[in-house]
Image (cartoon, helix red, strand yellow):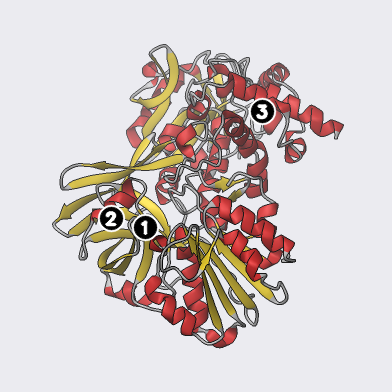
Amino acid sequence: MEAKVISKQDLATWIDALVKQYEVIAPVTEDGVVVFRQVSGLSEMTIEGMVGPAKSLREHFTPPTETLFDYKLEDLSAEVIPPENEERHRVIFGARACDAATLLYVGAVYSNVEPIDTAYFMRREKTYLVGLFCNKPAWSCFCTEVGDFLTNPVAMDVYLTDLGNRYYAEPLTPKGEELIGLGNFRPADENDKVANEEIRQKALERLPKRAEHETACLSYDWDHPVWTELAKKCLSCGACAFLCPTCHCFDIQEHPKLKKGSRYRCWDTCQFEKFTLMASGHNPRETRKERTRQRVFHKFKYSQERYCMLGCVGCGRCIAACPVNIDIRRVLEELEKTAVAK
Amino acid sequence: MRIENPYIPKLATIEKIITETWDTKTFRAVFKDEELRESFTYEPGQFQEVSVFGVGEAPFCLTSSPTRKGFVEFSVKKIGSVTSALHEIDEGATIGIRAPLGNWFPYEEFKGKDLWFIGGGIGMAPLRSLLNFCLDNRKDYGKVNIIYGARSSGDLCFTYEFDEWQNSPNTELFLTIDKEEERWNKNVGFVPAYVMDLKPSPKNAIAITCGPPIMIKFTLQNLKELGFEDNQIWTTLEMKMKCGIGKCGRCNIGPKYVCVDGPVFSYAQLKELPPEY
């Protein structure tokens, strides 16, 4: 599919055209941080110079709390009322490559065994992604260590690169071409292609080189001293998991009223003690040592064994958010040192 | 287009409640949908998520045998919020059921073999499904031995089926309780120790065990000492299972989810997994 270019002057009218047809979700600055919210035009968006959104797209595919069904009670009987399907089609504008790559992983988790998670896939089917290349990766970014999706994007329909006074746009799907068709684009010329390549190279130079996490992880050491170290520092606050785009674990709870109520699911994390605590009092992952190990192993070992892919997209949000400076890159380095030594 | 929402339970009526012990009841439920009631089937070892509307949902093994059609049974020890709510409800009440979930005992592989059911306390519930399944297909299996223990005689469940079990051809029931009691003429002692006394022969035999973790641990050790191979020993695990369909992520042991890859595992399979259960 042919690459196109749109000048920054024309961006606003393209966004307006998208807003007319779709619900458009784009990065905005809210309380000083960049998050994805529904917008009605370019003026609300934070696109220029954005380093990285503080929050991922996760909440737009699996909301922090989501009703599974409502119910009504009458004496001895009960009635279950399923939720209404959302009919809206959405464009997520300015999605990062890491957050888009997450969709492949979470999609695998939610479809790996029947039945599939219908709520998630219904949202996904109705969502189109206009991605944005990261000209200036953040200090905590390490996507290049876990994949090559920054330059070979996945799960996107269009991939934009900011070339200064214009955006370079690669349509990646027929839907992407259709979206581009709504704006005042011209075909990309040789200059545009060279500029695009240069910007990509520059960004790649800022990022760490690809490591061998895939192979090293599988031999990770169950009794490695790093787990005790982590357990000493970790506060079990769960910030890493709640900001992680690939973390997908949830709890199912009830919100009862007198004669009606709803069953809902909400985000949960293996970093919390009660995550695995059973009614009998038995807890298979009782201490922080077991819980921090679970998080790293789940992303780098179990995910490969189960879904044949890493459960980390290198967005670095867990690193940036950790109040006690736990850096998953350092943890992996420690593990790999001993994996190599063995 | 409406695709099935996998979290929505099917409505069922509690048809019968059996008080097993001071803290355990067995519930017999029938689906309200007549078609489903007829077509519903499952395998011994599978489990279900039971909803008490207004309280929540919790996993219970199907303790009934699929050979006995038209209803499902599950045994509940009063211990948490959903189990306590279940203990409060009456016959005729409506509950929700998502079932069948998980894997099952490979009963085809057990054919022609002597079976040793080794249960402790409420751990007898999942074994009962397979046990009654085997007794209903009696000719397919060799000698059936049942070792069943509890803290006291008052903690034994399914006592009303003891006669049926004992009187089945080529079947023997060995009961044990932890401490001496007046008028108790069966064995006294912990289940693993009783296993050592009875010395089951591993020859052409399968052991299926379930009970408190400590009982399973020592039973496994003893079975190994008696010469049972890892793939001759089967168990069914308990875990905090919320979704029951491999999505919510909390019942993993390494790369396996107990709710979809289990709850039934052989000891050989368990040895491949990290010790987090």
Spot occupied by residue A49 in the image (x, y as percentages of width and height): 53, 13
Residue, disc 3: A227
Q: Nearer the viewer, mark 3 or mark 2?
A: 2
The CA distance from mark 1 to mark 2 is 8 Å
Which chain letter matches label 1?
B
Tally of numbered discs: 3
- Element carrying mark 1: strand
Spot occupied by residue B25 in the image (x, y as percentages of width and height): 33, 61
Q: Considering only vertical position in the picture, is B183 above or below A258?
A: below
Residue, disc 1: B76
Nearest the camera: A122 or A339?
A339
Left or right: A136 in relation to B245:
right
Which chain letter matches label 3?
A
The CA distance from mark 1 to mark 3 is 37 Å
Neighbourhood count class around disc 2 (C-alpha, 10 Å): few under 14, some 14–19, many 20 upward: many
**Residues marked 1 and 2 touching at CB (< 8 Å):** yes
Query: Which residue type does callout 3 highlight?
Result: Trp
Nearest the camera: B88 or A130?
B88
